Amino acid sequence: MSIDVSEKIKLIRESERLNRREFSEITGVPYSSLSSYENRSKNAGVESIMKILQHPRFTKYTLWFMTGQTSPESGQIEPALAHFGQDATTSQPSDQKTG
């Protein structure tokens, strides 16, 4: 399954938990352009893609963005892997009294 460029940009942004305004400010890609890319009303050009992938925060997605592959041992991951940590755990309160 191939993901188009618009979806890849959106996945990177959402994985980093950034809204469009924040992503635009960080990368230097104009907000209106970013919105157009994500809404698929305009194709992202090479210059915008380079601005995103050359930013230190997003270089870890370069291989995935270009080829769809990852290399975790080289620090190259896909956005879906960026913020998966330990699952939240909940436990039932015990009836035991303390103190």
Image: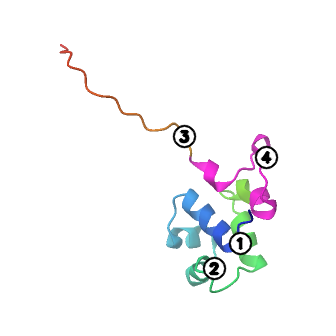
Is the C-beta separation of discs 4 and 2 under 8 Å? no
Task: Report which residue position mark 3 lands on.
Answer: 85
Quickly name the residue at label 4.
Answer: 71
Element type where label 3 sits in the image: loop
Q: Quadrant of the C terminus?
A: top left
Q: Residues within 10 Å of mark 2 (few under 14, many from 20)?
A: many
Mark 4 or mark 1: name the one nearer the start of the chain: 1
Amino acid type, callout 2: Tyr
- Magenta-colored stretch includes residue 82: yes
The amino acid sitting under disc 4 is Ser
Mark closest to the chain's N terminus, 3 or 1 = 1
Tell which of 44 and 94 is nearer to you. 94
Nearer the N terminus, badge 2 or badge 1? 1
Residue 60, horizontal then vertical, whole percent: 72, 53
Which residue has dot 2 on it? 37
Q: Are marks 2 and 1 in contact (CB under 8 Å)?
A: yes
Magenta-highlighted residues: 62-83
